[in-house]
Amino acid sequence: MTSIVLASSNPGKIREIQAILQNDNILPQSQFNVTEPDEIGSTFIENAIIKARNAALRCKLPAIADDSGLVVDALNGAPGVISARYAGPRATDKANLNKVLKNLKDVPPEHRTARFVCVMVYMRHAADPTPLIAQGVWEGRILSQAVGENGFGYDPIFWVEEYQCSSAQLSAEQKNGISHRWRALQLLSQQIAKL
């Protein structure tokens, strides 16, 4: 099977995707010293395509990329496509989630609905005119404070109704079986299998 480059330098994301796909032929773009492109898209789909095209071009291999983030209804969809840099260009996970908590401080629990969204893109080559696209959504709500030590990003403030805990209190196996990334990867892998 041909190797596929994973267009990400985020270690948490790389671990999740490799664990979910259980595929040894998926290589992180860091092995090829690929510089991440500027995410100038206004949607998750646009940014995922930018990243996949960049990785395919630089590595001369098929590429998978994702763009994902937290969408909070009471914040009109923010942080959305700027989830990784919500508190600034080089913001830490803690700074980002603290900004969400601050912006929601007067919002009651019943109006703190949110979802994680993940768009996965597979490009056969950099000029692929018909990339495969899959979207996964994971519904939840935002807690009033961070809870849990697992996961990354906004996991400590994302309440998972199914397990009655935050995403950061789930084991990697539990999260990888229900997350937005898992849902998108399931759909994408079905499309790839048909190629």
Image (cartoon, helix red, strand yellow):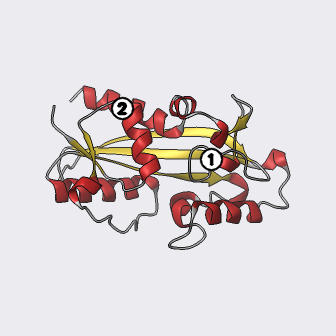
Instruction: Give, as a three-letter code, the residue at label 2.
Output: Leu
Q: Which residue is mark 1?
A: 155
* Image spot of residue 185 (x, y percent): 40, 35
Q: Which residue is mark 2?
A: 21
What distance separates the C-alpha of mark 1 from that of mark 2? 21 Å
Q: Where is the N terminus found, in terms of image quarters?
A: top left
Q: Is residue 109 left or right of residue 72?
A: right
Q: Where is the C terminus found, in terms of image quarters?
A: top left
Q: Is disc 2 placed on a helix, strand or loop?
A: helix
Disc 2 crowd rating (10 Å Cα; few below 14, some 14-19, many 20+) is few
* Image spot of residue 90 (x, y percent): 51, 72
In terms of image quadrants, where is residue 175?
A: top right
Q: Is residue 157 left or right of residue 15?
A: right
Q: Which of the pair 58/43 is nearer the observer? A: 58
In the image, what residue occupies the spot 73% across and 56% down? 74
- N-terminal of the two: label 1 or label 2? 2
In the image, what residue occupies the spot 53% across and 67% down? 85
Note whether 120 is above or below 81 in the view shown.
above
In the image, what residue occupies the spot 15% across and 36% down? 2
* Image spot of residue 123 (x, y percent): 24, 46
